[in-house]
Amino acid sequence: MEYDLEQKIDLEIKMQEGTNKLLAACRYQLQSLEALKSLLTSNERISAYMLELQRRKSLKQNKSPQKALLPCTGKVAISDIRMPLIWKDSDHFKNRGDYRRFAVFCLLKIGTEVYDTAMINNVDRSMTDIAFEDVITFNNVPQDFEFRLEVYSHVLQEDLTIASASNKLKKKISYSVSKAIGKRMSDNFREDGTFRNGYSDFELIAHAKLNLSDANARIKTYDLVMESIEKSNQLPLFGHFCCRLAVQPKCMIEETFSGYLSLVQQIGNITGSRRMLCSLKNFSLSMWSNFADVHSSNPDVVIPIKTGTKVTPSSKAISYPRFSFKVEYTEDDENKEHLLAADSPIQLSEWLNYIAQHIKDYELWKPASESLIEISSPCVCRNSQFIRHRNSSLYDETPFLGK
C-alpha cells in the first residue's frame, strides 16, 4: 500500500528537479510564474502523500476487524469558481488609486489529490470578480470528505508608472538618458518583462473548507477565510466565493449487486413466483422478468432501497418459500411489501448484506443521495494559462431578492 505513495513522491521530486532547471533558465515573467506555480503544487502533493503514509502506518499498528462491506465511494466535481473583489470606489469607477496587478490561481484538495486551476493574470482594479473556467473532478472519495480550496496570489506590479506605462512614456525615458541605459529601463515596462530581482513566490491569501452537506446542483455562495499577510500583497477579496460542488455517490451510477431472485406472489390460496433478474443501483432494486429486455426496457418492478425501507428474513415457522425475505416500504403514502426468494442460503446472505449496505449508503450520502446531481465535463482546453477575459461580471448575474 505504501509503495504506490512512495512512487508518487519520487515522481514529484523528479518533476521538481526538472522545474527548478527550467526556472533557472527562465527569462520572462510568465514562464517563471508558471514554473513557481508548478513547484508549489508539487510541494503540496508531496505533503499530502507524506501525511497519508503516516496515517497508513498508524492504521497498521491499530488493526481492527474489517467490515464485510464498506460504504460506497463517490465522485466530487468543482466548477464555476468565482470570487468577487472589493476595490475602493475611486479605484474601480474612477480608475485611480490602487495600481497593483496580481496573478491568481487556486489549489483544490481532497485527501491526497491536489489539483491547480489555470492562472488568471493582470487582475487589477478594472475587474469586479475573478472567474476560473476549470472543472476539476475527484474520484473514489469517501462520504466524510473535506474539500479545501486555497487561493494564491502574486503581486505583478505595485508602481503606477510601471503598471500603466505606455509606449509614449517609454520613449520619454529613452530620450532622457543614454541609449544603452534607456533601452534597459524601457525593457522593464514590457508586459512579459524579465525577472531581475530574483524570484518571489506566491502567497496563500485565503482558504475555504466544504463537505458533503455543501453539495448542490446549483452554484452556491460560501465563505472565504482570509489569511494574515502584508496589506500590500493582499488581493482585495470580498470574503466570499461561488462554486458548484457536485457530488455523485458511485452506487447511484454503478451497479452495486445483481443476480436472480424469485418474486413470490399470492392470489387467494394460490402461491406462485416469477424468476426475476435483479439489479441493485441508484437506491432501487430493479427487477425484469424478461431477461432479454434488461438493457432496452424499463423494469417490471422497482423497489426503493433507502431510509424507511425495512428488510426482514422470513421465519422458518411460517410457510414461506425457503431462503426468502420481505421488503416493506412506503410509497405515495401507501404501505407496500414484496416477498423475494433467493436460490441458496449464501445468495440470501449476500442479498441481505448488500441491501442493508445500500440503505446505509443512502443515509451516509445525504443530501447527494436524494437526487442525482449531474457532473460537468472537465475542461478539455487550457489555452494560455495567463488569460484574464471573462464573459460577464458576477454582479451582473447575481439575482436580487424580489426579482
Image (cartoon, helix red, strand yellow):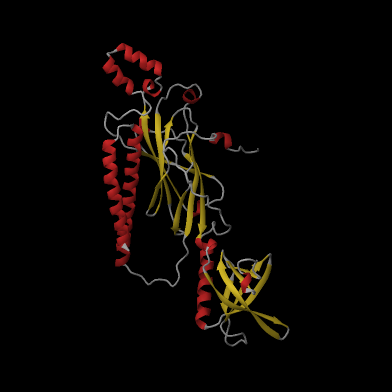
Assign the N terminus to one quadrant of the image.
bottom left
Residue 128, how many percent across, how many down?
50, 32
Residue 121, how many percent across, how many down?
42, 33
Assign the C terminus to one quadrant of the image.
top right
Decide if residue 356 is on the left or right side of residue 100.
Answer: right
Judge by depth and name the residue closer to the eye, 229 or 204. 204
Q: Against 394, is 55 above or below?
A: below
For the image shown, how many numbered marks are present on the structure?
0
Query: Which residue sits at x=48%, y=51%?
Result: 77
Residue 265, how many percent across, how many down?
67, 80
Residue 119, how many percent across, how many down?
41, 38
Q: Quadrant of residue 301?
A: bottom right
Query: Which residue sits at x=59%, y=74%?
Result: 277
Q: Against 96, is 373 above or below?
A: below
Judge by depth and name the residue closer to the eye, 78 or 364. 78
Q: Quadrant of residue 68?
A: bottom left
Judge by depth and name the residue closer to the eye, 251 or 35. 35
Query: Which residue sits at x=58%, y=84%?
Result: 315
Single out the residue that lies furthest toward the top.
Answer: 176
Decide if residue 220 is on the left or right side of residue 116.
Answer: right
Q: Against 304, is 77 above or below?
A: above
Q: Quadrant of residue 285?
A: bottom right
Query: Which residue sits at x=36%, y=31%?
Result: 155
